[in-house]
Amino acid sequence: MIIKRSEAQESIAGPAGYFTGEARIEPIHLEAREPSRVTSALVTFEPRARSNWHRHPLGQLLIITSGTGWTQIEGGERVEVREGDSVWCPPGQKHWHGATATTAMSHIAIQEELDGKNVEWLEPVSDEQYQQP
């Protein structure tokens, strides 16, 4: 059994190459340990912050823990998500998620690695894409 104490884990700023605006990542279990492939983190988005477009080789589960946010799959409509909601994004589906323009949002993100990779980061979500209903 491995226990990681919360005070021993530092949060990190969401890298500018993968996020627009202020986002913070708090590790839960960022590295998969064989034979498990699971990684996870608590991500907090300040208002207007969002991830880049991205996809996960084995899909991603989001559990909204606070606030209100938006998520969208490529070609689909932007959808509002709130505290207590969960979102499943299928393997390989291009998508983004983040806060609304006026409210922060936090979620737990859970995904699995395939061949050592759990995400493929793509281009930023433009302001025009972000603002479309």
Image (cartoon, rainbow, N blue to C red):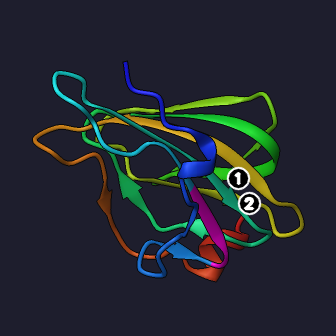
Magenta stretch encompasses residue 73: no
Left or right of 93, for residue 8 = right
Left or right of 90, for residue 36 = left
Look at the image and tell me whether residue 77 can be seen. Answer: no
Q: Quadrant of the N terminus?
A: top left
Which residue is nearer to you in this view: 60 or 93? 60
- For label 2, count other residues whose C-alpha is less than 10 Å away and answer few (under 14), some (14-19) or many (20+): many
When the figure is inspected, residue 127 is found, relative to residue 92, above or below; the finding is: below
Residue matched to label 2: 99
Q: In the image, which residues are magenta?
A: 21-25
Give me the residue at 68% from left, 57% from top: 44
**Three-letter residue code for mark 2:** Ala
Residue matched to label 1: 70
Which residue is nearer to you in this view: 15 or 19? 15
When the figure is inspected, residue 22 is found, relative to residue 5, above or below; the finding is: below
Secondary structure under tag 1 reads strand
User: Residue 98: x and y, percent?
Assistant: 65, 59
User: Residue 14: x and y, percent?
Assistant: 53, 70
Q: Quadrant of the C terminus?
A: bottom right
